Image: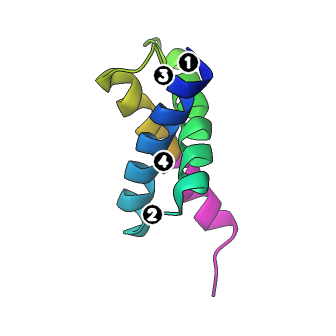
Amino acid sequence: MSVLAWIVLGLLAGFIGSKIVNKRGEGMLLDIILGIVGAVIGGWIFNAMGASGVTGVNLYSLFVAVIGSILFLVVYHAAFRRT
């Protein structure tokens, strides 16, 4: 995938993931980073379970990236809980 495709997929996945977990977005740059990290984490998890990971800019890859970003946010908030 091209860099632009990773950025677009990351923005969409990060925004959706942060909306599901936080009920608000994290900001455009953090959503892009969150989505890209989520795509890597989700791709790794899906590959470990025997399914294909991120395959391009499509709905399946968006689903994988959103699942990865949600898992990343849940672990992040559990580790660095703000009081």
Residue tagged by mark 4? 14
Residue tagged by mark 2? 25
Magenta segment includes 77: yes
Residue 24, by quadrant, is: bottom left
Q: Is residue 74 left or right of residue 80?
A: left
Residue tagged by mark 1? 48
Q: Amino acid at mark 4?
A: Gly
Residue tagged by mark 3? 46
Nearer the observer, 83 or 54: 54
Q: Position of residue 14 (x, y in %)?
A: 48, 47
Magenta segment includes 62: no
Closer to the chain start, of discs 2 and 4, is 4
Nearer the observer, 37 or 80: 37
Q: Amino acid at mark 1?
A: Ala
Nearer the observer, 77 or 6: 6
Residue 3, by quadrant, is: top right
Check disc 2: other Cα within 10 Å, few if <14, some if 14-19, many if 20+. Answer: some
Which residues make up the magenta segment?
70-83
